Image (cartoon, coloured by chain):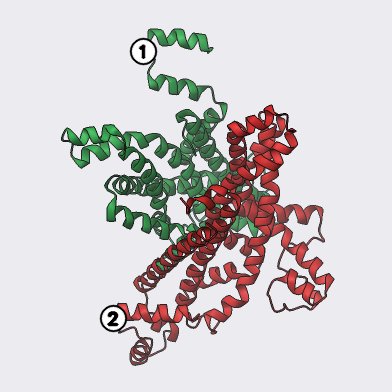
Amino acid sequence: MQQHPMVAILRRLGAFILVLVALSVMIFILARVVPGDPARMALGPAASQAQVAQLRAEMGMNDPLLSQYLHYAWNAVHGDFGMSLVSQRPVTQDLAETVPATVELVLASVIFMFAVAIPLGVLTAQYRDRWVDVLGRLISLTGVTIPSFLVAISLQLLAARFWPSWPILGRLDHGLNFHGGPTGFMLIDGVLAWRWDVVASAAQHLILPAFALSIAGIGQITRITRAAMLENQRKDHVLTLKSFGVPERVIVFRYLLKLSSIAPVTIMGLEFASLIGNAFVIEMIFSWGGFASYGLEAILHKDLNAVSAVVLVSGLFFIVANLIVDVVITLLDPRQRQKGGR
Amino acid sequence: MSDAKMLLDASDREMSAAYMMWYRYSRKPAAVIGTLIVLSAIAMAVFAPWIAPHPKDVGTVVNFRARHHAPELAHLFGTDQVGRDILSRALFGMRVSLLLVLGVLGISVPVGTVLGLVAGYFGGWVERVITGLTNVMLAMPPLVLALAVSNLLEPTLTNAMLAITLQWWTWHARLIYAVSKSVAAEDYIEAARLSGAGPLHILFREILPNCVSVISVKTTLDAAFVILLGATLSFLGFGVKPPTPDLGSMVAAGRQFMPDYWGEVLCPGAAVLYVTLGFNLLGDGLRDMFDVES
């Protein structure tokens, strides 16, 4: 019995690898059907026809498509996505420098989401149809419908108006003379370097963008939590607890909450796709300089190698997030643990 | 109308399903407000040339003397950096948003529905191919894919539409697949098959009617997401070409003059919020009305 969750997770992992392979095929095809010759773009308009032809041969572009794809996949598995046209450096190196910033931002906003949405969902369900519920539903409706760029800009406006010293751009004060550390996470690097001023500044810079990024998820998760709480309140075992005179507080926090957090965690996994998408907007508005900013720049300059790496890594984010979600759900939900054994 | 009155009414008329639905709908203020907002947005988009106070400002008009006006009687939303009326441009911008919705959902809803029906009813390798394809597409953040595709081709409205559609059908296919698969196991489907109904009849006359409520709820809620996605794309500079007004690119333009002329950001932004709010309220209302599980 103990092994079964592991087996289930391994099976999911296998499925995810298949998804990743299919995704890479799609991106490869996408990059080939694009109008314009990568060799011509790399050399510029001044290059002669012969030079372009030579580079095409060097890039392997005259080979059959299948062998081109295998070559591409082989390199990608080894972490080689080719050179970026814009930065003139290996794409992998660019990614290694930018991805941690985005992960830091996304993790912070996931923490915000659960910290705000779960209590709000519980509150609105407990005080159904009272003013707390109406207010909470209004907040979640607004969260779902408001464009994230509008939230981000409004936050910047409010900060500029009411708290001019609060930082609204970048990840750190330039004056601190700190240039990152081994992990790339500003908060952790600050702790490692024993620089509490860096940690404080990084946290200050992180709050607004992380909050702006979390708004959509807060709306979604509050709704789901509320619906799950309401549904589970009617279940027989909860009624049994009530009739035994178990205090409301214990029922809600010990029994209902765990049961009702399965649905929001599941949704979180799907939410990740739009979370990564919104990170592109938020990073641009707050000059965050992470992976999404890099991706946006690459797309603007039609930097094919960088674009396909960015698309692939975005998909990877989603897949990893969903693997984690699967594990968390297995831990939360005893029914999932039993499934394999039957 | 009270419940008793409704019952009386219904005894005259046959208590049709449509009447019950209308009754449930009319008792939901959120659904009614949502409908009104959506209808008003559509009206604004359709009649934009006639109701816009300064229809000329939609094109390449420059009036530097009137630039950055705060909201006033002549310009309810103020004017932008070259003196064009923001309200007029926002009204025309609604057209772009709603056209995008029409284009994306007009293709992806039928395609997704048919593929979902087929996958759920036939099963076997058809099911495996279609669900596998949806799993791959869903792993891609919609915005990232749309950005990449539309810019690698050429950043125009049509390409943005294409790029979003490329992925959007999968959500519908998955949803309809689930319904179709559960319905396909029902006895009356078997009965229809035994009495000689062809696959086309079963798919579209027996299974499809079961999906109507799910499709309409999903489509309405999707309209809001597509508008958000479109506005975000054009905010990032991947939408329509500059002289054409678009809500997302208006926000982006206003952002350059931000702390001082904040109305230029918030007014077009509020217009996006207005439309998405309407579709969301309507979708939630429809869900209650059809009693669909989310």
Q: In front: B213, or A34?
A: B213
Q: Chain of mark 2?
A: A
Q: Are marks 2 and 1 on the same chain?
A: no
Q: Chain of mark 1?
A: B
Chain B's colour is: green
Rounded to the nearest whole Å, what is the CA distance between mark 2 and mark 1? 68 Å
Where residue B224 appears, as percent x and y from the top left, is 50, 44
State left or right for residue A50 relative to residue B5: left
Q: In front: A36, or B200?
A: B200
Chain letter for the red colouring in the rendering: A
Residue matched to label 1: B14
At label 2, the amino acid type is Pro
Q: Secondary structure at mark 2?
A: loop
**Crowding near the residue tagged with mark 2, few <14, some 14–19, many ≥20 C-alpha atoms within 10 Å:** few
Note whether residue B63 is visible.
Answer: no
Q: Residue at x 73, y 38 (%)?
A: A250
Where residue B62 appears, as percent x and y from the top left, is 56, 56
Residue A31 versus residue B63 in the image, above or below: below
Residue matched to label 2: A64
Where residue A45 appears, as percent x and y from the top left, is 41, 84
At label 1, the amino acid type is Glu
Where residue B215 appears, as percent x and y from the top left, is 40, 39
Q: In front: A58, or A6?
A: A6
Q: Secondary structure at mark 1?
A: loop
Residue B53 versus residue A58 in the image, above or below: above
Q: Residue at x 72, y 68 (%)?
A: A171
Q: Residue at x 49, y 53 (%)?
A: B230
Quadrant in the rendering for residue B77: top right
State left or right for residue A10 relative to residue B200: right
